[in-house]
Amino acid sequence: MPRAGTPPIGRIKSIVGGSAGNLVEWYDWYAYSALTIYFAPVFFPKEDKTAQLLSAAAIFAVGFLMRPIGAWLMGIYSDRHGRRSGLALSVALMAGGSLLIAVSPTYARAGALAPVVLVVARMLQGLSVGGEYGASATYLSEMALRDRRAFWSSFQYFTLIGGQLLALAVVVVLQTAMPEAGLQEWGWRLAFGVGALLAIGVYILRTRLAETQSFTRQSRDRQRSSVIGLWRQHPREFLIVAAISGGGSAAFYAYTTYMQKFLVNTSGFSRSSATEIMTVALVVFMLIQPLWGMAADRWGRKRVLYVFGFGGVLLSVPIFTAISRAETPAVALGLVLVPLLLLGAYTSISGLIKAELFPAHIRTLGVALPYAVGNTIFGGTAEYVALWFKQAGAESGFYWYLTAIIGMAAIGFVMLPETKTASLIEED
């Protein structure tokens, strides 16, 4: 097990191992969103394209409704049985959900049963991701040395975005390898089958990870992790984490997963062009995560967070308005990169600032549950709200809605202590 006095290679190996699992976990989660434009007609045979996307987005939101439950159950599990055990369990659930989507029947064959199977699969994936965020954020934060903690913790979103990129890459390969009709009829299933196989492999990898000092050094009579204990002992931290998670998650899903549909459904780009634009944008977004992490190690967490909080409030409306009017892929790409560069200031250290707020015995639950609550209310519904505004003929209303939610996060950043100097992670 990596300790403070051992060579850095052991610690880095553990961080890389945990991050690799995170990549596959989020690939499976985002494959649903990346392929919605293809499989929505298979499960929801309606004439209106926006109505199909709304139905698929509603099931996407169902996965988010399960995330607080997953955060609760697996947050406690990880606090009591170890971060490594929680990571292994989360990826096992993801494998099951992805496999179920890969073999799910269509509406033409099973009628109303088809979307029901899709709902069950997303519920499994929601449970998985609900536990994944807290376990991986806690694991990476506890494994990193104090003076490089933000840098190493930034690899949570580095690999999270990597998973999203992998999903988009698979879509590009499928688009190139088969006609659109074949991709819409059955080709999309291949992506979920690949995800299930990768998740099984990562499960084996995660069972062999080293455990963190923060968990192993606790005494046997340590306090037990529980929701009641979390709320009684840390109500202020709970509310702050929920608020900043809501704003950060809404922005993340608006500018990444929903943006691909926005480019098609509003800006008028083709599906392939929208995929290419978002692929390049996400590569840049992924690469800036460690840079923002290094900035937070040097100048503190709050200064970096303010870049996203107040920058997002000022720019959300003009940026969405400009993207809706973009006429070329190059212009659209340049505009999409602006909010992503700001958002990186939050995503790079989002897990770390939460982990540093809580003591070891309740840390995973403290990171996971309030994050899942904020993410479910504002992140999981962002795409649905955006499409609702569009269908109502008032699409710009979503731009103002997003501005308000990011403003909520900005208030949370002001209330947040400077965890660079007040971290409750005691081990280096």
Image (tube, grey):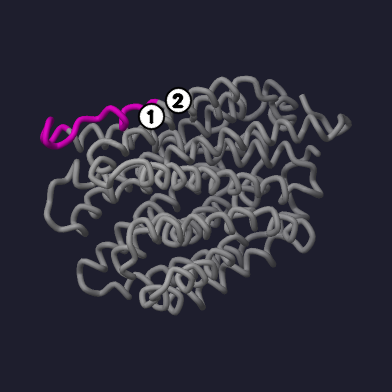
Task: Locate residue 266, reporting x and y percent.
Answer: 30, 69
Residue 97 covered by magenta stretch: yes
Q: Residue furthest right?
A: 5
Q: Main secondary structure of the magenta part?
A: helix
Residue 401: name its quadrant: bottom left
Q: Is residue 177 left or right of residue 103?
A: right
Residue 204 or residue 170, whichever sits in front: 170
SS state under label 1: helix
Q: Is residue 219 left or right of residue 234?
A: right
Name the residue rendered at 20%, 69% in the picture: 392
Task: Locate residue 236, reporting x and y percent.
Answer: 56, 54
Name the residue rendered at 46%, 45% in the picture: 169
Residue 197's label in the rendered image is 2
- Which segment is the magenta one? 96-113
Identified by mark 1, the residue type is Gly
Task: Locate residue 298, reporting x and y percent.
Answer: 79, 60
Q: Is residue 170 left or right of residue 162?
A: left
Per the image, the residue denoted by label 1 is 193
Residue 87: name its quadrant: top right
Residue 57's label in the rendered image is none
Residue 178 covered by magenta stretch: no
Q: How many marks?
A: 2
Is disc 1 surrounded by few (<14), some (14 to 19) or many (20+) residues within 10 Å? some
